[in-house]
Image: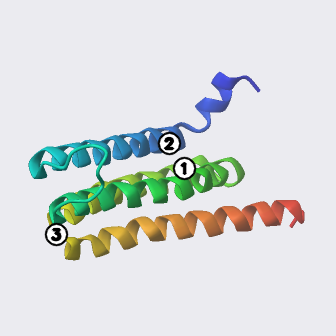
Amino acid sequence: MELGNIMDHYLLTSLATLLAAFVLFFAMVNVGKARGKYEVQVPSTDGPEGFLRAFRAHANTVEQAVMFLPAMWVLALVVDDMYAGIIGIIWAASRVLFISSYSAEAKKRGPWFMTGFLCFVVTFLWALGAVIMKLLDI
């Protein structure tokens, strides 16, 4: 199958991947703004609480993306692009809301953290189960 034909079948997952890249960019810019606002010079990763919240929101989003993106693509390849893409879009939206709420006040991050984390857990377990079932030819 040609690359063009493959990509025609994974458009939602591709969109979700691009949204995830945007989320990572958004988090990075948020840290940059916090550096300016709180006068935290590079390469320091310590500073006032407002800077630390932005920094941790970024770091946590990177940590989640490293786990979520491969799981999402395995789900798309083994199960279905639509399911993987929809979960990926929800993950990306939840991470933007997580970054925004965590940067404003640490206590507000919880619901959006859990939404993104549940997206990962569902995606990972579903993809793992599908791979195992295919390996066992079930």
The first of marks 3 and 1 along the sequence is 1
Residue at position x 54%, y 49% in the image:
82
Percent coordinates x, y for residue 85 in the rendering = 50, 49
SS for callout 2: helix
Neighbour class for label 2 at 10 Å: few (<14), some, many (≥20)? Answer: many
Answer above or below: position of 99 versus 82.
below
- Write down the residue under mark 2: 12
Whole-angstrom CA distance, mark 3 to mark 1, is 34 Å
> Is residue 90 at all visible to an observer of this figure?
no
Q: Which of pointers 3 and 2 lies earlier in the amino acid sequence?
A: 2
The amino acid beneath tag 1 is Met
**What SS does tag 1 mark?**
helix
Mark 3 residue type: Glu
Query: Would you say 44 lies left or right of 84 here?
Result: left
C-beta proximity under 8 Å, tags 1 and 2: yes
Viewer-nearest of labels 3 and 2? 3
Looking at the image, do the residues carrying marks 3 and 1 touch, with CB atoms under 8 Å apart? Answer: no
| Image location (x, y in percent) of residue 71 | 61, 56
Q: Nearer the viewer, residue 105 or 41?
A: 41
Marking on residue 105: 3
First in residue order: circle 1 vs circle 2: 2
| Residue at the spot 29% in from the left edge and 51% down from the top edge | 44
Q: Position of residue 15 (x, y in %)?
A: 46, 39
Mark 2 residue type: Leu
The mark lying in front, picked from 3 and 1, is: 3
Q: Is residue 66 above or below residue 12?
A: below
Horizontally, residue 27 falls left or right of residue 122, namely left
- Labelled disc at residue 69: none
